[in-house]
């Protein structure tokens, strides 16, 4: 079954609240959509956000990469020779991981549809459902407490709390949230590279002394500061999760073997898609490490693809797939069911999400 055509579109969705981290503030999901059309008439869908502060990709660079490099390299290839197709995708240009991820998931969607099976089952079928956290943006203490209580009222049991913009107030923020939500809510802390190594050790120690009881702290220091990550991991009790420091299986092996972090956050936009992410899962599993599956500011299209990977592989024990829950609109039809914190897989072939015609106008 040969690849007939690869087309580009756009996804634009409003957020319920501005999304604020130590790196950026965003008010809308503005992503590139991709569809791969097979000679059998079936269509696979993918998506990529422009997250320049993390991946280096912009909307323009994603579209250029797909239109001028990836599509010409893949058009006409036999999708049933999946190894060759994915190898060509990854080798046709360096970097541009978000563009590759959008095409990768569209290819995987089309491949699974052609085989008549849901992707999560074809990739391993570890579980039929799981729970995601919900992100709490970094703001003043009162607003973060209010947002946390609203999330709990919506049924979320795990909160991912953004910090790192104002290190001096981060312990106060987290202690106030813990006091407000009580001891039964799981708190994950994400600094988004916002601290120095010594500052991170001091703040995490303060969290521990204040009884915040965080499950983990994500990417406390800049991604390139490998020695700083090692220093933090060695000097705190709270587990450290590497996010921006890990794009590839080689990155994961280096971080885990040298104990620069305890866990790995897998994001399709960093790995370049599901196919390379499977190799990262295998690397983490071989080293006995747990993984989180995460997302950028993405719609249901690519978050559903990540959900299929999470449902397929047992090494992924934590999920941060709250993109659809952050959007202030009705979800696209089909695919995994996003019901508050619960993500439930279906038996629909492929990834399952149907993308409206308006995205391709």
Image: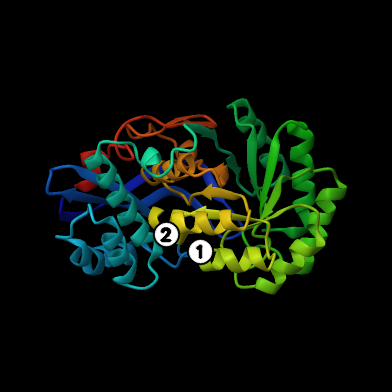
Residue occupying the point 37% across, 67% down: 96
* Nearer the observer, 24 or 356: 356
Asked if marks 1 and 2 touch (Cβ < 8 Å), the reply is yes
Q: Is residue 203 visible?
A: yes
Please, which residue is most extreme toward the front here? 286
Q: Earlier in the sequence, mark 1 or mark 2?
A: 1
Residue occupying the point 67% across, 45% down: 188
* Nearer the observer, 185 or 154: 185
Q: Specify the label residue 249 is tagged with.
A: 1
Asked if residue 283 lies left or right of residue 215, the reply is left
Q: Residue 42: x, y in percent?
A: 18, 42
Q: Residue 81: x, y in percent?
A: 24, 56
Q: Residue 139: x, y in percent?
A: 65, 48
Q: How many marks?
A: 2
Residue ID for mark 2: 276
Please, which residue is most extreme toward the right here? 209
* Nearer the observer, 108 or 81: 81
Residue occupying the point 57% across, 48% down: 292
Snapshot colouring: rainbow
Label 1: few (<14), some (14–19) or many (≥20) C-alpha neighbours in 10 Å: many
Asked if residue 159 lies left or right of residue 184, the reply is left
Label 2: few (<14), some (14–19) or many (≥20) C-alpha neighbours in 10 Å: many
The alpha-carbon separation of the residues under discs 1 and 2 comes to 8 Å
Q: Residue 300: x, y in percent?
A: 39, 40
Residue occupying the point 28% across, 56% down: 82
Q: Secondary structure at mark 2?
A: helix
Q: Secondary structure at mark 1?
A: helix
Q: Specify the label residue 224 is tagged with.
A: none
Name which quarter of the figure residue 69 lies in: bottom left
Vertical comparison of 337 with 58: above or below? above
């Amino acid at each position: 079954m040969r690849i007939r055509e690869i087309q580009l579109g756009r996804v634009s969705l409003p957020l319920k609240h501005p999304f604020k981290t130590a790196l950026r503030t965003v008010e809308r999901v503005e992503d590139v959509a991709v569809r791969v059309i097979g000679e059998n008439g079936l269509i696979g869908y993918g998506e990529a956000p422009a997250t320049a502060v993390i991946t280096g990709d912009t909307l323009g660079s994603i579209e250029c990469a797909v239109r001028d490099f990836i599509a010409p390299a893949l058009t006409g290839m036999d999708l049933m020779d999946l190894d060759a197709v994915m190898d060509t995708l990854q080798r046709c240009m360096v970097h541009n991981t978000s563009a590759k991820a959008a095409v990768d998931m569209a290819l995987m969607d089309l491949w699974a549809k052609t085989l008549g099976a849901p992707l999560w089952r074809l990739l391993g079928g570890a579980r039929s459902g799981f729970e995601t956290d919900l992100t709490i943006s970094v703001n003043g203490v009162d607003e973060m407490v209010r947002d946390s209580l609203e999330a709990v009222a919506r049924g979320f049991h795990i909160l991912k709390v953004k910090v790192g913009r104002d290190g001096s107030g981060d312990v106060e923020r987290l202690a106030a949230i813990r006091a407000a939500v009580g001891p039964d809510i799981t708190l994950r802390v994400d600094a988004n590279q916002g601290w120095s190594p010594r500052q991170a050790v001091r703040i995490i120690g303060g969290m521990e002394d204040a009884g915040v009881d965080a499950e983990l702290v994500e990417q406390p220091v800049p991604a390139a500061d490998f020695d700083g990550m090692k220093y933090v991991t060695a000097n705190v009790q709270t587990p450290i999760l590497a996010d921006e420091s890990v794009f590839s299986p080689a990155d994961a092996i280096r971080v885990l073997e040298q104990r620069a972090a305890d866990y790995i956050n897998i994001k399709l936009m960093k790995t370049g898609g599901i196919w390379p992410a499977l190799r990262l899962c295998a690397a983490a599993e071989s080293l006995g490490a747990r993984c989180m599956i995460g997302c950028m500011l993405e719609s249901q299209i690519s978050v559903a693809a990540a959900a299929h990977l999470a449902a397929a592989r047992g090494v992924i024990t934590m999920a941060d797939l709250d993109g659809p829950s952050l959007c202030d609109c009705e979800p696209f039809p089909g695919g995994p069911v996003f019901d508050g914190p619960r993500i439930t897989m279906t038996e629909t072939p492929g990834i399952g999400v149907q993308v409206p015609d308006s995205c391709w106008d």
